[in-house]
Each structure stands twice: as structure tokens, then as C-alpha cells.
Image (tube, rainbow, N blue to C red):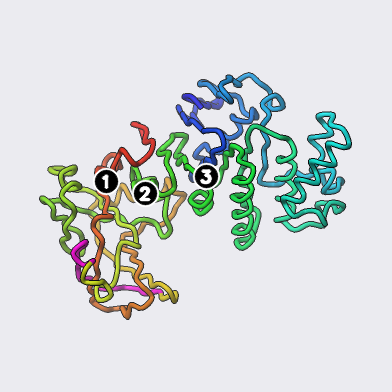
């Protein structure tokens, strides 16, 4: 995808100057909140949407003006798009019959696909007699038999319940690795994005925010939006003032590594980003690790014990400029709450209780510092953070 733009009649760019190079056999996820342009981008790849400007290249060939049937791509939709009057066998065989394949070839390819997807015993059933997961596997079987150059998935699991989504996620990952076929997968579910993709493209309002591996997105988010979108519970955002290597937070002052301090010297008020997992009950920290972070004392408002871990909630006050940025971020994230409270994840062995003045340890090597005006991550290691467009 080279500088892809999609504008509708009102001139609004649903996709705005997006460039992504997907390698042969790679599994790339397009992720973002509703209206970010991910499905529009997928539909432009397959040819269901016209491209306003830019070049769509497949195998080195420009395909902007090619009809969908001439692009040799297989698409799996959210709603399965199965023919209710046809059996599973005939649904899978449909693209082969359309292409004029022989009966022998159809038998061979359908049987091979049904074996891979464990549908052998359902081949004579109609879609109405199948579960949601089985119907999605039929849709995937129809894609497999086509010998396509790439698979395109448009939120294929969103109609399934949580348990089935987990099972199908594993099946899709296993199938893609087995077939080694280039795959582009659209989702708004960050769990799917983080577990399935070789690389993940995070989109916001038609703009590419960052393109990187799931680990790089999590550890080196390029801006506030990516930091807030990736991770559950989301990253904590707090007002921060930096003086040398000391960072003043609402709960006290902590030390950060010198290399991070150098990048933000003289920047004034910043937003500190710290993931819940970077915290721990100070009484449970091994002395050999204690010097890797800092400790502070704070009153705990609410505690949620989940067995293997405990979530503690610590409210704080934030100045107006930080509040304003967090409110905008909430809107961009489809209303995900970023209230001014610190959410920390503690070991399940912690005895911290509601109302306690607890001593908390934080791994400050995992702290990020963001510009409140632009949202840019000022402490990110750009060499390892993947593709971060200058306009993000």
C-alpha cells in the first residue's frame, strides 16, 4: 500500500495517506476503534472500494483498476456469507465451481480443506444446522480451496461468544502458519491483534499511528493513543514534572534512568505513562530488584482480588491540561475510561486492603513520558518502535 487515500463525497478522508508493505507469508493485523478506516482499507485491498489516490500493489503489480475477481484474494467476512440452501460441501466448493474446476479437483480440494478444518462429518449439513464456530470454519474452507495469493479477514470472530473466539483465534493462527499464506486481518479486539499478528498496524481516524510487532507496540508505544489502545487494563497516565532524573508524580517523586531523563530535559509538565504491571507491593519485592525502581506511599481506594493477581485503585488529581488530553484520548478510544486514578496490578499474595496507606514499588525503567500537547512519546526508542509516521 503506497500513500493510500480514500475520500467519500463529503471530502472526509476515511483513509489518509496510509503506506504499509506486507511481506510474502506475513500475518498483519489492522486494528483501531470504530471508524478508524481499517475495514475500508481491507475493502480497497480486495477491490470492493475504489481508491481515491495512491497505489495498491500485489506481487509487484498495480491493481487499483482490477476487479475483485481478478486479484486472486480470498476474503472471510464477519457474517460468514454462506448460502443457506447449499450443504457445507457445496458452500466450500462454490468458488471452484465458479472457476470451472473439474469434479475430481473439487472433491480433492474440498476434502483437503474439510480435513484441515475438522469439518469432515458436517459436509452434508446445511449452515443452519451448524454452530457459529463451525460456520466460520466453512467460510474459511471456502477461502482455502481458492489457492489465493492472500487471505483477508474482516472481523471474523466478532459474532462468536468469548470462549469460541479464543478457540477460533488459535485455529486461525495454526492454519495461517501451516499454509504460510499472506494474511491481512481486521479487528477492533486488541487481544486478537496482540496474539495473532506478526506485525500490527494501529489506525486512528484514517491515519496510521504505528506499525510494529505486538511486543514493540506494548513496550514502545509511539504516542498516547497507541499507549492507551494497546494493553488491558490500559496504561496509567499521570501528570509529571521532571527535574534531572527525578520525576514528580501525584503520589511522590521517583527516579528514572538517565537516558530517559536526557530526552525530556527542560520540557516542563509532561504525562507519565506506566502500565499496571510495572507496579508491585513493596513488601513482595526481592531486595536484588528493589534498586531497579522506586517506592512511594499512597492510600488505596478499591481492591479487587482475582486469585493470582490483585488490582488496586488509587485516585489522584490532574491539572487541566492533562485532563484535557485524557478526555480527548477517551473519545479517540471509543469512550474507554481513563479516569484520574492509578490502576496497579499486584501479586495475588499481597495483603494490601482498601483504605490502607500502602507502600508501592514501581519499575521506572518501564515509564514513558508524553508531550501533553502533541501526545508524542518523548522517551520511546525509535529504532525499536517500528514505523511511527511523523503526523501520528
Taking 235 as reference, is 10 left or right?
right
Do callouts 1 and 2 mark residues in contact (Cβ within 8 Å)?
yes
Q: Which residue is mark 3?
A: 34
Label 3, label 2: how many angstroms apart (C-alpha)? 17 Å
Q: Give the mark, 1 or 2, whose residue is nearer the N terminus.
A: 2
The part of the chain drawn in magenta is: 289-304
SS type, badge 2: helix
Q: Is residue 207 above or below residue 280?
A: above
Pointer 2 local density, CA inside 10 Å: few below 14, some 14–19, many at least 20: many
- One can see residue 343 in this view: yes
The percent coordinates of residue 120 (x first, y second) are 81, 54
Residue pictured at 24% horizontal, 67% vertical: 361
Determine which of the numbered discs, if any, sits on residue 370 in the image: 1
Q: Which residue is mark 2?
A: 227
Does the magenta segment cover residue 8? no
Pointer 1 local density, CA inside 10 Å: few below 14, some 14–19, many at least 20: many
Instruction: Name the residue at the left extreme.
Output: 244
Q: Give the quadrant of residue 348.
A: bottom left
Do callouts 3 and 2 mark residues in contact (Cβ within 8 Å)?
no
Label 1, label 2: how many angstroms apart (C-alpha)? 10 Å
Residue pictured at 28% horizontal, 55% vertical: 366
The percent coordinates of residue 51 (x first, y second) are 57, 24
Q: Is residue 156 above or below residue 7?
A: below
- One can see residue 353 in this view: no
The percent coordinates of residue 50 (x first, y second) are 60, 24
Label 1, label 3: how many angstroms apart (C-alpha)? 24 Å
Taking 214 as reference, is 320 left or right?
left
Taking 81 as reference, is 309 left or right?
left
Amino acid at each position: 500500500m503506497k500513500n493510500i487515500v480514500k475520500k467519500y463525497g463529503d471530502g472526509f478522508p476515511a483513509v489518509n495517506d496510509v503506506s504499509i508493505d506486507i511481506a510474502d507469508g506475513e500475518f498483519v493485523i489492522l486494528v483501531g476503534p470504530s471508524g478508524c478506516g481499517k475495514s475500508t482499507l481491507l475493502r480497497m485491498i480486495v477491490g470492493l472500494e475504489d481508491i481515491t489516490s495512491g497505489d495498491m500493489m500485489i506481487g509487484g503489480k498495480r491493481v487499483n483498476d482490477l476487479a475483485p475477481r481478478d486479484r486472486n484474494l480470498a476474503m472471510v467476512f464477519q457474517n460468514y456469507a454462506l448460502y443457506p440452501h447449499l450443504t457445507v460441501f457445496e458452500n466450500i466448493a462454490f468458488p471452484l465451481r465458479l472457476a470451472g474446476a473439474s469434479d475430481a479437483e473439487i472433491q480433492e480440494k474440498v476434502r483437503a480443506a474439510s480435513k484441515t478444518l475438522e469439518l469432515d462429518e458436517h459436509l452434508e449439513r446445511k449452515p443452519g444446522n451448524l454452530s457459529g464456530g463451525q460456520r466460520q470454519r466453512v467460510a474459511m474452507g471456502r477461502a482455502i480451496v481458492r489457492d489465493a495469493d492472500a487471505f483477508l479477514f474482516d472481523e471474523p470472530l466478532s459474532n462468536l461468544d468469548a470462549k469460541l473466539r479464543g478457540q477460533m483465534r488459535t485455529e486461525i493462527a495454526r492454519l495461517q502458519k501451516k499454509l504460510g499464506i499472506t494474511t491481512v486481518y481486521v479487528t477492533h479486539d486488541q487481544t486478537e491483534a496482540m496474539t495473532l499478528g506478526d506485525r500490527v498496524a494501529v489506525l486512528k481516524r484514517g491515519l496510521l499511528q504505528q506499525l510494529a510487532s505486538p511486543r514493540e507496540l506494548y513496550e514502545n508505544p509511539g504516542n498516547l493513543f497507541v499507549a492507551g489502545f494497546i494493553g488491558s487494563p490500559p496504561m496509567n497516565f499521570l501528570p509529571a514534572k521532571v527535574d534531572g532524573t527525578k520525576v514528580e508524580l501525584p503520589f511522590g517523586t521517583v527516579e528514572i534512568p538517565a537516558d530517559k531523563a536526557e530526552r525530556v530535559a527542560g520540557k516542563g509538565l509532561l504525562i507519565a505513562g506506566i502500565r499496571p504491571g510495572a507496579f508491585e507491593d513493596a513488601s513482595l519485592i526481592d531486595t536484588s530488584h528493589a534498586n531497579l525502581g522506586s517506592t512511594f506511599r499512597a492510600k488505596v481506594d478499591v481492591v479487587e482480588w482475582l486469585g493470582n493477581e490483585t488490582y488496586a485503585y488509587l485516585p489522584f488529581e490532574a491539572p487541566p491540561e492533562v485532563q484535557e488530553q485524557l478526555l480527548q484520548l477517551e473519545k479517540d478510544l471509543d469512550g474507554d475510561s481513563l479516569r484520574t486514578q492509578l490502576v496497579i496490578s499486584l501479586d495475588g499474595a499481597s495483603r494490601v486492603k482498601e483504605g490502607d496507606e500502602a507502600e508501592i514499588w514501581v519499575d521506572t525503567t518501564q515509564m514513558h513520558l508524553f508531550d501533553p500537547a502533541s501526545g508524542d512519546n518523548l522517551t520511546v526508542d525509535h529504532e525499536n518502535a517500528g514505523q511511527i509516521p511523523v503526523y501520528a
